Image (cartoon, rainbow, N blue to C red):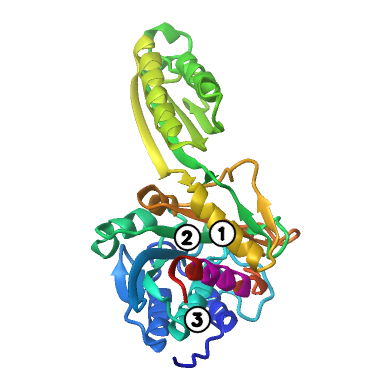
Amino acid sequence: MMAIDFDPQAFRHALHQYPELSNHEAQSARTIAAQLCDFGLTPHTGAGGHGIVVDIAGREPGPTTLLRADFDALPIHEHTQLDYASCHDGIMHACGHDGHAAALLAVAAELCQTPPKQGTVILAFQPAEETGEGAARLCANPLLATRHIDNVYAFHNLPGFAQHQIVVRPSTFACASTGVAIRLYGKTSHAAYPERGVSPANAMSDVMRMLTQLPDAYPSTFSLVTLVHAQLGDPAFGVAPGEATVMATLRSDDNATFHAMQTRLVDHVNAIADRAKLTVDLSWHEPFIAAENSTAHNQVVVNAAQSLGLEVHWLKEPMRWSEDVAEFLARWPGALFGIGSGEHHPQLHNPDYDFPDAILATAKALFCRVITHHHGR
Ligand SMILES: [Zn+2]
Ligand SMILES: [Zn+2]
């Protein structure tokens, strides 16, 4: 056993000061990997972009558990008075991924001092969460793709919940979501002779109505379509329009429903366009699948929280936002949970947001308790 002196708060502040956008996390990755090396570990770097994967093996054979933390930042201008505020203009850690990474390093330090008895703990530091790209890439990397993993755990800090509260759900924790852009092409004409062109105006309103009614076909799930943008022709009184664009965001708490909803949308759009003699260009953007928890793994989190005397909050509905840790949970069973950042804490992605240092110890303790459950210590 060796004594390790690691200060997760100081480490987080250092990450916070030099935030990097998704797919550009080179410096942060070097900082994290160097810290893991200081602990005596052998991290694999450059996984799925700037990802880092490191194994901590127990003395005896046993199960494999993966703990995941993201570490990318956002294109937001920081408005805080912190002495460790962002030094990168227009980029900030507004989602608390600096805290997620620092907490996982604290777990690494603890597991180096008191290793698991059985099996292997994998720590995965994932890049590019905000763009929904990092998790799928990391899961597909040979370091993980072919491995048998029994348990996956990750947390997100949650403003609006009491600080230290553990937020859980035995099924879907965070929704699937995707953007869709639908472009309809006809032919412009003189506004005095609209019949000489092909206007997408009626089809556009049909598409918009169809989109808002789409979730009605799936009453047993939480499904939502939000119209976010629409444009018809150009602002010219003399021209009947020849083009239209409709953009929307789709969400669902169920991956199968989400897939069915997308297929149904394409069928309806094609039918509407055919009737109106329009051509269609349809594209999907920023797709995330739903983060579906295993009931058993969620219960492991609940038991760990209770054994630590932490308050547990059971979500009635899933979070409507998306988390690409869903890619891990689609391959291996596990649980995503929340740790309350404080009821009146600034919201995620706000310019005055800062990860609450107080919950670093909570996250570390909870993860370590979960590891003890699966691996012994
Ligand atoms: Zn975020
Ligand atoms: Zn986040």
48 lies left or right of 301 = left
Q: How far apart are marks 3 and 2 (CA)?
A: 17 Å
| Marks 1,2: beta carbons within 8 A | yes
Q: Give the main secondary structure of the magenta stretch.
A: helix
Looking at the image, residue 300 sits to the left or right of residue 24; the answer is right
Image check: 313 left or right of 251? right
Q: How crowded is mark 1: few (under 14 residues within 10 Å), some or many (20 or more)?
A: many
* Type of amino acid at the residue the image marks with label 1: Val
Q: Which of the two labelled residues, at mark 3 and mark 2, occupies the earlier sequence position?
A: 3
Which quadrant of the figure contains the N terminus? bottom left
Residue bearing the label numbered 1: 301
Give the image quarter of residue 257: top left
Residue indicated by mark 2: 153
Q: Name the residue under label 3.
A: 110
For badge 2, the amino acid type reads: Tyr
Which secondary structure lies at badge 1? helix
Q: Which of 344 and 280 is in front in this view?
A: 344
Residue at (50, 64) in percent of width and height? 73
Which SS class for mark 2? strand
